[in-house]
Amino acid sequence: MHGCSGSVAERWITALHRLIEANHDVKTVSVWAREAGMSPSSLRELSNLVHVRPSDARDFGRVLRTIVLSPAAWQPEAALDIADHRTLERLAARAGLAPDEIAQRPLLTVFFDKQTFVTNRQLVARVRESRHLPAADLLTLHPVQIDSKHTANRISELRADGVADRRSQPPNL
């Protein structure tokens, strides 16, 4: 996060955005720190300062990344580097998803409202409003993984969530 200034929440959201932009599932805080250009201890301290356990922050970002980059026929086990179904079930439960809801990608608003990784509602609201999840980013994050039909569908869904309308504006932390 070289050259990043602003509040602790802004810096944490920027680090979260780096996790979402990763070309792979970020399984550890150390790998997340590397993606964010920080030391693991700095990222842990940053998470602690916003009152979120670093592992919970990482899992919040992992699930958020999976939701943003997945098609409607959601297969989180394909996007998450997990070892067994128990891990997926634990992540899904913390994401606020019932076992029968795992087959369909949740809307971002539903995830933000039901997840239990980040209990600081003000911080969740800042993430929701941060504009780090605009539709334009979907075209540049992983263009190989996203086809034009999927992109059009996601833009429509994001517009319904109120995110895509801000895609041409710069990030507002």
Image (tube, rainbow, N blue to C red):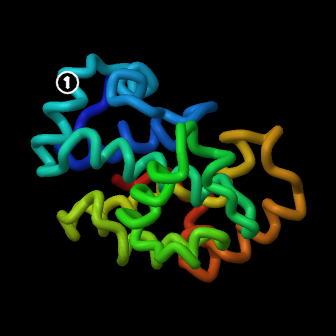
Viewer-proximal residue among 107 and 157: 107
Residue named by callout 1: 42
Residue 26 appears in the figure: yes
**Residue 24, percent across and down?**
60, 32
**Residue 111, percent across and down?**
45, 71
**Residue 116, percent across and down?**
29, 65
Q: Quadrant of residue 45?
A: top left
Residue positioned 89% across, 63% down in the render: 149
Viewer-proximal residue among 140 and 142: 142
Residue positioned 62% across, 82% down in the render: 160
**Residue 27, percent across and down?**
45, 33
Residue positioned 68% across, 47% down in the render: 78
* Total count of labels: 1
Residue positioned 36% across, 37% down in the render: 15
Q: Amino acid at mark 1?
A: Ser
Viewer-proximal residue among 112 and 101: 101
